[in-house]
Image: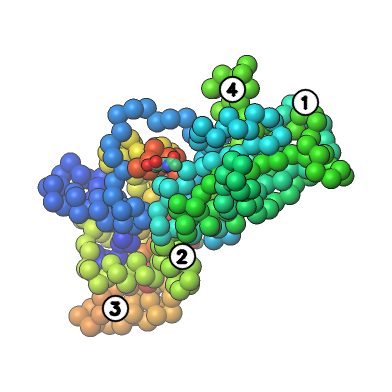
Amino acid sequence: MRGACACAVVCALVALCAAAGLDEATRVAAEKQLLALLGLPKRPSRRSAPVPPIPRAMRMLYEASGAIPAAAANTARSYQHVPTELDARFPGEHRFRLFFNLSGVPSDEVARGADLKFHRATEGTGPQRLLLYDVVRPGRRGKTTPILRLLDSVTLLPGEGTVTADAIDAVRRWLLETDQNHGLLVRVIEEGQHNVDAKRPHVRVRRRATEDEEEWRSQQPLLLLYTEDARAREARENGESRLTRNKRATQRRGHRPHHRRKEAREICQRRPLFVDFAEVGWSDWIVAPPGYEAYFCQGDCPFPLADHLNGTNHAIVQTLVNSVDPALVPKACCIPTQLSPISMLYMDEHNQVVLKNYQDMMVMGCGCR
Ligand SMILES: *[C@@H]1O[C@H](CO)[C@@H](O)[C@H](O)[C@H]1NC(C)=O
Ligand SMILES: *[C@@H]1O[C@H](CO)[C@@H](O)[C@H](O)[C@H]1NC(C)=O
C-alpha cells in the first residue's frame, strides 16, 4: 500500500537515475515527464561546444538561491546589446541605442521585471541624469523624428558600482509585438540643466577602442529579464499546493516506486536520494548544480501513530481502523509533507543561460497521511 505514496518528481527522477536498467521506451517516457515538470517543451539540443561564460549577474542570482528580485517571477535571463550597423550613428558616450534580442523568450512567459544594469565609469563624476527611452518608432533620416517614450530617469551621483534603470514597460511591449523592438535609447545629461549632454564620464554604454572583448564583457550594460512561466502562474493563481496535486495525480496513475523489501518494516522517514544530472545524461545543458539531494520518503506508518510522524487526524483514524481490520483500509502513507524549491541554471535552445526556480523539488519532511 505504501506503493501509491511517492511524489511525481522523485518518481520520474528515480526512473531516470536507473536509466541503465530501463528499456528505451520507458526511459523516453520518464524523460518526457520530467521535461514537462520542468516546463520545457523538449530537451535542449545536445551541446558539443563548452558552456559559454555565465554572466556574473546570473551567477549571483543562482548563488543567492534563486532570489529573483521581482514578485511572482520564477525565471531569469540576461541579455547583452547586439551590435548592429546603427551603432555607428551614436559615436558619443552620452547617447547610445541598445538592442536586446528577446526573440527566444517562450510565449507562455509573462514579464514581471526588467532591470537594465549599467556599470559606472571608474572616473564617474555626477551629478548627472540617465534617461532611458523605449524607441516606439525609429526616425527616418531627414524625414521623421523618432517616437520615444521615457521609461526611467535615474540620478547619477559620484561613485562606482552599478546603476539600474527599469525597462519593464518596453519589454512588455516587445514580448507582445515581437517585430516592434527598435531598442532602447540611453541619454545622459547634466543634472539641473535643461537638455545638456553630460560632459564628464558617467556610465559605460559602448566599448572603447582600447578595450578587448573580455574586458568589455564585464563592463557592458546588461538587461536582466524576470518572467513567470505558465506552470508557475497556474500554480500561484489557483493557490493549490503542488504537494496535494502531485499526490492526487500520483494516486490516480497508481505509480509504484521500487521498494527495497529489506526496509519495508522501517518507520516512515526521509531517506537520501542524490540525483546526479551527469548520470541522467543532462549535464550538457544543466549548467548548475551538477546534481542535487532530492530525498524521498519511505517507511511504515504503524499503529499507534507517533507524533513525530506528522500525521493528520485523518491519518490517525485511518491507522486505527487498519489496526482493527487491515482488510477494510490500508495504513496511512509515508509521503513528503514539506518540500522546498531548488534553482537551476540551464542552456536553452538559443544558447542562452536561463535561471529557473522549481517548486517542491526537495523533501524537507515526511509524514504519514
Ligand atoms: C534574434 O535571435 C534569433 C535567434 O536567437 C534570430 O533568429 C534573429 O534573427 C535575431 N533577431 C535580430 C533582430 O537580431
Ligand atoms: C515531520 O516534519 C518535520 C518538519 O517538517 C520534520 O523535521 C520531521 O523530520 C518530519 N518527520 C519525519 C518522520 O520525517
Task: Give ligand 1's quarter of the image.
Answer: top left
- For badge 4, the amino acid type reads Glu
First in sequence, mark 4 or 1: give its number. 1
Residue occupied by mark 2: 233
Q: How is the image coloured?
A: rainbow
Q: CA distance from mark 2 to mark 3?
A: 43 Å
Q: State left or right for residue 34 relative to residue 236.
A: left
Residue 287's label in the rendered image is: none
Q: Secondary structure at mark 1?
A: loop
Q: Nearer the viewer, residue 341 or 321?
A: 341
Q: Position of residue 337 (x, y in %)?
A: 43, 65
State yes or no: discs 1 and 3 in contact (Cβ < 8 Å).
no
- For badge 2, the amino acid type reads Arg
First in sequence, mark 4 or 2: give its number. 4
Residue occupied by mark 4: 215
Q: CA distance from mark 4 to mark 2?
A: 39 Å
- For badge 1, the amino acid type reads Glu
Q: Nearer the viewer, residue 140 or 150?
A: 140
Vertical position of residue 167 compared to residue 72: above or below: above
Say which residue appears at 53% left-offset and 57% top-offset: 173
Q: State left or right for residue 203 relative to residue 37.
A: right
Q: Position of residue 106 (x, y in %)?
A: 40, 53
Name the quarter where the N terminus is drawn. bottom left
Residue 323's label in the rendered image is: 3
Q: Position of residue 140 (x, y in %)?
A: 57, 44
